Amino acid sequence: MEQKISRKDLDSGNLLRFLKHRFLTQQNRQTLMPVLSCLRDSEVIVPVQVNVSDADRARILNAAKGESVDTIDPVSFKPDLLQSEDGTFLPVFSSADQIDPEYAKNFALLTVPAVQCIRTALDMKDVSGLVIDAFTEAMLVPKESAEIILKMKSHLEPDQA
């Protein structure tokens, strides 16, 4: 991915899935680096638990459909973590259709820059890294690879970086 890419090219998650599939079927440095580069500039979906106070929860539930509600107390988000024999991983998804619907029912799904997820995973001491598309064609991104991603330069077009 030496050429510049637009945010629109990344939005569907198709490019990330294509590069991930190519890496998983032919694992080498030449197929790994494009996946990492694409992930660096992508936005991903992260399943989180939303923690709100009881008072704010009541205000939200009593609000009219479409009404904005300002919370009084802080709201926090706790990302889900998945266990495997390889460790504990922060799941990220290239698009909503990669998420098991039964699993998704238990979470709020936030779309965030992958770089933000990488930093979160690196800050969590018991997390081994990220897993991309855990329920379809899963790819583990260990912390060592995640650190490489943060050192990569963006390939987004200049007005989108």
Image (cartoon, rainbow, N blue to C red):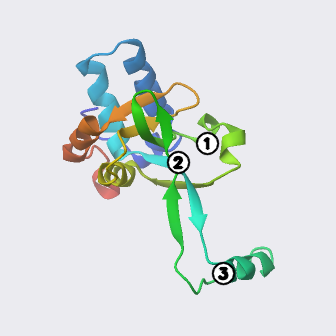
In the rendered structure, which amino acid carries the disc numbered 1?
Ala
Q: Secondary structure at mark 2?
A: strand
Q: Is residue 33 left or right of residue 91?
A: left
Is disc 3 surrounded by few (<14), some (14 to 19) or many (20+) residues within 10 Å? some
Q: Is residue 58 left or right of residue 56?
A: right
Q: Is residue 86 visible?
A: yes
Residue 28 against residue 40 in the figure, above or below: above
The picture places residue 83, in percent across and down from the top left corner, at 49, 36
User: What is the C-alpha distance between the residues marked 1 and 2?
Assistant: 7 Å
Q: Quadrant of residue 15?
A: top left
Q: Earlier in the sequence, mark 3 or mark 2?
A: 2
> What residue is shown with label 3?
56
Q: Secondary structure at mark 3?
A: helix
Is disc 2 surrounded by few (<14), some (14 to 19) or many (20+) residues within 10 Å? many
The picture places residue 126, in percent across and down from the top left corner, at 35, 46
Is disc 1 surrounded by few (<14), some (14 to 19) or many (20+) residues within 10 Å? some
Q: Is residue 139 left or right of residue 144?
A: right
Q: Secondary structure at mark 1?
A: helix
Q: Residue drawn at (51%, 69%), measured in percent from left and top?
A: 76
The picture places residue 26, in percent across and down from the top left corner, at 36, 12
The answer to which of 20 and 133 lies nearer the viewer is: 133
User: What is the C-alpha distance between the residues marked 1 and 3?
Assistant: 28 Å
> What residue is shown with label 2?
45
> What residue is shown with label 1?
96
In the rendered structure, which amino acid carries the disc numbered 2?
Ile
